[in-house]
């Protein structure tokens, strides 16, 4: 009986497991294992520590989405990632700014000015991001045969538009090799 148990343990431990990254210590790799769209990891977080990483159910249907927060005191960067063209969260009332390029793709930029007040909304610009907050919406391609990703990078608490752009431009693939 003992030999059978030892044999089973050896067989189980040597078998390939599709969720190999689960428990790797890297939440991006762990999350990527269960998703069909590509995850991206922010390399530049303006030296703000990661304070939250969550996989959340998508109210708009589709796969779970990833919410990550980097914050210290009032400064906060949030990165939301979903399967391409799936809307899982609502960023709130804002005014659209001119589009910008993020790693070769077009990103739509927004500032949290009240669009219902047309007089003040017309005056809103990228300079208001540090005072009111703002966000970027864009799509990055899939890698290793996975689906593309819709990304929202949001900044509040005194982070400038230029800093918001630098965070978005520093997103890199979370995985350096294909999942099993």
Image (spheres, rainbow, N blue to C red):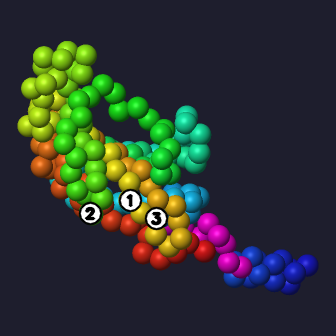
The answer to if 16 sits in the magenta stretch is yes
Above or below, 148 relative to 145 = above
The C terminus, quarter of image: bottom right
Asked whether the residues under the numbered discs 1 and 2 touch, taking CB atoms below 8 Å apart as contact, a structural biologist would say yes
Secondary structure at numbered mark 2: loop
Secondary structure at numbered mark 3: loop
Is 85 positioned to the left or the right of 96 in the image?
Answer: right
The span shown in magenta is 15-24
Residue 140, numbered circle: 1
Residue at image coords 13%, 19%: 120
In space, the residues marked 1 and 3 are separated at their CA atoms by: 7 Å
Judging depth in this view, the residue of 54 and 122 nearest the camera is: 122
* Mark before the other along the chain sequence, 1 or 2: 2
Residue 5: x and y, percent? 83, 77
In space, the residues marked 1 and 2 are separated at their CA atoms by: 9 Å
The N terminus, quarter of image: bottom right
Residue 136: x and y, percent? 28, 44
Residue 47 in sight from this viewpoint: no
Q: Quadrant of residue 137?
A: top left
Residue labelled with disc 2: 103
**How many numbered marks does the figure carry?**
3
Is 23 positioned to the left or the right of 98 in the image?
Answer: right
The answer to if 10 sits in the magenta stretch is no
Residue labelled with disc 3: 142
Q: Residues within 10 Å of mark 1 (few under 14, many from 20)?
A: many
Above or below, 130 relative to 121 = below
Residue 100: x and y, percent? 21, 51
Residue 140: x and y, percent? 38, 59
């Amino acid at each position: 009986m003992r030999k059978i148990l030892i044999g089973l343990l050896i067989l189980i431990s040597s078998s390939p497991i599709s969720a190999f990254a689960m428990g790797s210590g890297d939440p991006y790799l762990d999350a990527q294992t269960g998703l069909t769209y590509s995850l991206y990891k922010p390399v530049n977080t303006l030296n703000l520590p990661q304070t939250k990483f969550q996989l959340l159910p998508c109210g708009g249907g589709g796969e779970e989405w990833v919410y990550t927060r980097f914050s210290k005191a009032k400064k906060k960067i949030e990165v939301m990632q979903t399967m391409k063209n799936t809307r899982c969260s609502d960023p709130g009332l804002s005014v659209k700014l001119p589009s910008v390029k993020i790693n070769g793709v077009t990103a739509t930029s927004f500032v949290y000015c009240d669009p219902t007040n047309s007089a003040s909304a017309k005056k809103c610009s990228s300079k208001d991001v540090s005072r009111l907050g703002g966000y970027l919406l864009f799509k990055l391609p899939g890698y290793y045969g996975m689906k593309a990703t819709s990304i929202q990078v949001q900044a509040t608490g005194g982070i400038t538009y230029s800093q918001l752009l630098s965070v978005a431009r520093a997103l890199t693939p979370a995985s350096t090799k294909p999942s099993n």
